Image: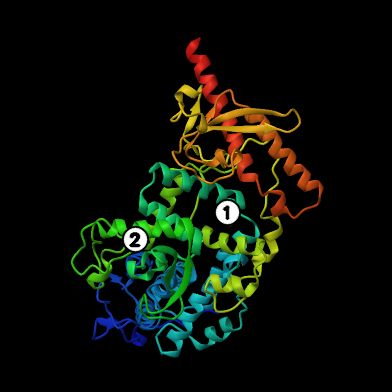
Amino acid sequence: MAGLRITAHQSPERRWPPRDTIIMDRAGLPVDVSGAVWRMNDPMRSKSINWARLPLQDCTALDAIKSYFAHLIKSVSPAAVGNAFYQIGILARMPAFQQAAVTADLIPYLAFSEAREYLGKENQWKLHYGRAMYRWCTQNGHAGFDQGVLDQIEDWRIGGNSKGKAVRSRDPDEGPLTAREVSAIITALRAARLSGSMPLPEQAALALALAFGSNPSQFASMREGDVEPLRSGDEIAAWIISIPRHKKGDALSRSSFRKRKLTGLFGEIIQDLIEWNQSRPAFENDARPLMRKGKLRKRFTMDDQWQAHMSASAYTALLQRAVLRLGITTYGGKPLEVTCRRFRYTLPSRMVANGASQAAVADVLDHSDLQNVPVYWEIHSDIVDHIDAAMTTALAPRAQAFSGIIRSETEAVRGDDEASRRFVADRETNRVEVIGNCGEFRFCGITAPYACYTCVKFQAWMDGPHEEVLDQLQRAREERANLGLHPKMIGIEDELIDAVKDTIARIAVKRADEDSTNV
């Protein structure tokens, strides 16, 4: 539908800038809308609208869109405002929209048709933003917006964005982590914690992501007071974690919380982080963030209590740095790529594999309904991967899951202590052979010898019978498969199989290096 040309004597009245260039957002905080960049009040993200990025010259259409965004700032979150600005920018770039804006015509139906063709079927949902803007501008009498065009686009069935695509397809770069990838991360995290090779903030970023699967902005807005230890006598039995709720219509961060319980390794890491934080100097007006910055954030628009908080993007970078440090790789040998969203997908996937209900999954994800959770039931039967006996593991961390490989007992940390030896027994031949030494100076309580392969204190003998250990584990796995057991039971020792394979592979590399040196 062609727009009606507005001639010179019909020039519309300009309605921007408004008389008051300081508006209050939905949290009651001021936003300056007088310049080319509008900076919004988001404590966890740097959110702003840069009008130089919108390809519109000074015109009535731009006036209308600015008025619409002033309205949005007063009624929705900064994140929602930023998202709307990006999506509406797609519509504003369409040739028909550009032509109408330059000539002060009505924005035509053709602009939406062009945008729909440009976006394709999969991304048409983005036109919801442009339609909402056109509706508001029409209803508020802005020049260039026509009721007839609005009636046409209101009849469109645009649909919603595709939900669960990364989960459903098990995308190796964006979908949920497999059970073996999670196992490799936790094993490597334990090893790094024992060896002291990973900073506490990185440990904590991993622990929170693995335990709760929340969004980075939620973790970044947490404070030390959100962690409450539950004591049993003089010991801490568990921790109650108050996680700030986001995307629930709250105007302010930290307006409401969801309490979660944390135990074991992850709880110990968070407790250690708090104690470490408290040994560091506090900033003025410091609200004691859990994930704290080393320096105050610059160009900050909110009050001082947020300046020591890590931003959401910094938290994600910290998480990615932690996984990179652990040396976890994919089956193809590439470094494992992670985001908070991947961990968020992973948690319900693991819950479903363990028989959780839809209501339980929705509760963990803090969803108000069940519409987004059924996708996890579509893929749960494939969560456990099949392991081929000849497959060389690529998931085991290359950053040494244990202390090292030694040629003889004289190189062992406790080489003079026969009690440090670890043995494997072959029931068919009634032989007992040494596989390595333990470098721990106290009883650890793990099940030797198999669990030794995942321990940071284990020192494997180069000439030890590791192939026999691998063969025993694989034969036991095959027997469980032949019995028709559940995949979770079949793969219960897959982590050990990976660790033994990694030991064998690194022994071969070390032997080859020594042989080449001796040539």
What colouring does the structure picture have? rainbow
For label 1, the crowd category at 10 Å Cα-Cα, with few meaning under 14, some 14 to 19 and many 20 or more, is many
Q: Residue at x 42, y 44 (%)?
A: 194
Residue 408 appears at what percent x and percent y? 51, 22
Location of the N terminus (image quadrant): bottom right
Q: Residue at x 47, y 29 (%)?
A: 417
The residue to which callout 2 is attached is: 291
Quarter residue 42 falls in: bottom left
The residue to which callout 1 is attached is: 177
Residue 430 appears at what percent x and percent y? 72, 29
What's the residue type where badge 1 is placed?
Answer: Leu
Residue 143 appears at what percent x and percent y? 40, 85
Q: Is residue 171 above or below residue 512?
A: below
Report if residue 372 is visible in the image.
no
What's the residue type where badge 2 is placed?
Answer: Met
Task: Please state which of residues 401 and 220 is positioned toward the viewer in this rendering.
Answer: 401
Quarter residue 45 falls in: bottom left
Q: In this rendering, would 57 be left or right of 92?
A: left
- For the residue labelled by badge 2, is the local secondary structure a helix, a strand or a loop? loop
